[in-house]
Amino acid sequence: MKILVINGVNLNLTGRREQGVYGTETLADIQSELDGFARSHGHEAFFFQSNIEGEICTAIQNAEGVYDGIVLNAGAYTHYSYAIRDAVAAVRVPVVEVHMSNVCAREDFRKRSVLTDVCKGEILGFGKNSYLLAMESFWI
Ligand code: DQA
């Protein structure tokens, strides 16, 4: 399988920002681990990060017919981006929503995701392992 891992706004700062919440590993570190994890199971992982909402929509649109699944951590866009929601709903590629932190145990505004009900599923609260579990969900 070919899995596209999309990271949204501010996730390029992973490893530097709010280390108590998101850990000390960089996005590059996490992506390298995901790459190895996918390969070890006979699959391929591809990566895209952007702070720009429209670019994330374009990446989701372009995934149609190319990838078997998308792992999506939209960052704060999760909580209010109807554009990303519509992009997810528009493609036939299954999308699994991911959060490193347990957003349900944080500020009220994080408890609402506008993406969850158009996604195949959601994994949250396991740090970088949220990505691993989401990837694995495509082939278990
Ligand atoms: C996040 C949670 C979001 O609320 C936050 O805006 C992020 C990261 C997570 O991975 O826990 O940027 O998606």
Image (cartoon, rainbow, N blue to C red):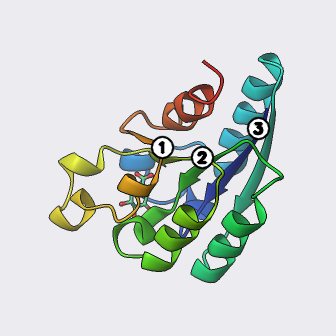
Q: Which residue is mark 2?
A: 94
Q: CA distance from mark 3 to mark 1?
A: 25 Å
Q: CA distance from mark 3 to mark 2?
A: 23 Å
Q: Tell me whether the residue at label 2 lies in contact with that at label 1, contact meaning CB atoms closer than 8 angstroms.
A: yes
Q: Tell me whether the residue at label 3 lies in contact with that at label 2, contact meaning CB atoms closer than 8 angstroms.
A: no
Dot 2: what SS?
Answer: loop
Dot 1: what SS?
Answer: loop
| Residue type at the position of mark 1 | Lys
Q: Quadrant of ligand 1?
A: bottom left
- Mark 1 is surrounded, within 10 Å at the Cα level, by few (under 14), some (14 to 19) or many (20 or more) other residues, namely some
Q: Earlier in the sequence, mark 3 or mark 1?
A: 3
Q: Is residue 15 visible?
A: no
Closer mark to the observer between disc 3 and disc 1? 1
Q: Residue at the spot x=73%, y=59% of the render?
A: 48
8 vs 103: above or below: below
Q: Is residue 53 left or right of residue 64?
A: left
Residue 16, x across and y down, in percent: 54, 57
Specify the quadrant that holds the N terminus. Answer: top right
Q: Residue at the spot x=59%, y=46% of the render?
A: 94
| Residue type at the position of mark 3 | Ser
Residue 137, x across and y down, in percent: 56, 28
Q: Name the outermost residue toward the left.
A: 108
| Residue type at the position of mark 2 | Pro
Q: Which residue is mark 3?
A: 32
Q: Nearer the viewer, residue 65 or 7?
A: 65
Q: Is residue 91 left or right of residue 73?
A: right
- Mark 3 is surrounded, within 10 Å at the Cα level, by few (under 14), some (14 to 19) or many (20 or more) other residues, namely few
Q: Which residue is mark 1?
A: 120
Q: Nearer the viewer, residue 63 or 17?
A: 63
Q: Nearer the viewer, residue 112 or 11?
A: 112
14 vs 130: above or below: below
